Image (spheres, rainbow, N blue to C red):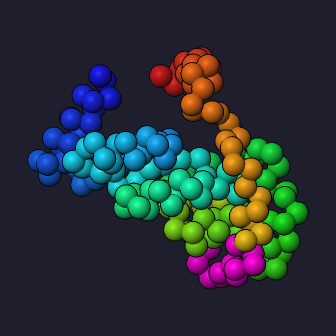
Amino acid sequence: MILMWCVESVSKLYKEGRIKAIGVSNFYADKLVDFCLNNTIKPAINQVECHPLYARFESQKIAKEYSVILQSWASFGKGSSDVLNNPILVQIAKTHHKSVTQVILRWLIQRGVVVIPKTTHKQRMIENIAVFDFALNEAEMSKIAQLDRGKSLFIDLNDPKSVQSMRNEFQDEDFL
């Protein structure tokens, strides 16, 4: 019921021209398709966990079918599972004289995934934007794609206990 009220409210704002687009976050493919088929206004973007270890290829394919762009959160896997020290990524970075984070950002960008890497460090901001002076070849793109484990590094959003646990964690941090 709350979701329907939110959708109706946002749709009204869109129709009035008070907002330019709507977006969703963490919609698995089935939820995105349901949303697109049952609402007059389609989201422009779906923000999801997306990185070399959870590449979301199928989600991206389905989103594209509905003209929805994928945006990555946790592009570096929050440094989990040692993704920044992965030997394949390290080797590709050395080949291009770039950092592993730059290689990951370039890989996502070349796939058509929007990236907004989070940092408060000026040097990292400079590094994060310096990804347009090189390109990964097909073999490199494929090697990175093979790192995909097909599951989240953080939370299964289809598991009610995981979602409750995450909510409790954020409440403890005065987030909500």
Vertical placement of residue 108 versus 24, above or below = below
Question: Which residue is nearer to you in this view: 85 or 129?
Answer: 85
Residue 61 placement (x, y as % from top left)? 51, 61
Name the residue: 65% across, 68% down.
Answer: 107
Which residue reaches farthest left? 16
Vertical placement of residue 145 versus 170, above or below = below
Name the residue: 21% across, 35% down.
Answer: 8
Residue 69 placement (x, y as % from top left)? 43, 59
Name the residue: 20% across, 42% down.
Answer: 11
Q: Is residue 91 magenta?
A: no
Which residue reaches farthest right? 87
Residue 68 placement (x, y as % from top left)? 39, 57
- Residue 143: tell me if it is visible: yes
Q: Which residues are magenta?
A: 130-141
Question: Horizontally, is 125 left or right of 64 in the view?
Answer: right
Vertical placement of residue 50 versus 107, above or below = above
Name the residue: 31% across, 47% down.
Answer: 37
Q: Is residue 133 magenta?
A: yes
Q: Tell me the chief SS of the magenta region.
A: loop
- Residue 169: tell me if it is visible: no
Image quarter of the N terminus: top left
Question: Horizontally, is 87 left or right of 173 in the view?
Answer: right
Residue 6 placement (x, y as % from top left)? 27, 32
Q: What number of labels is visible?
A: 0
Question: Horizontally, is 164 left or right of 46 in the view?
Answer: right
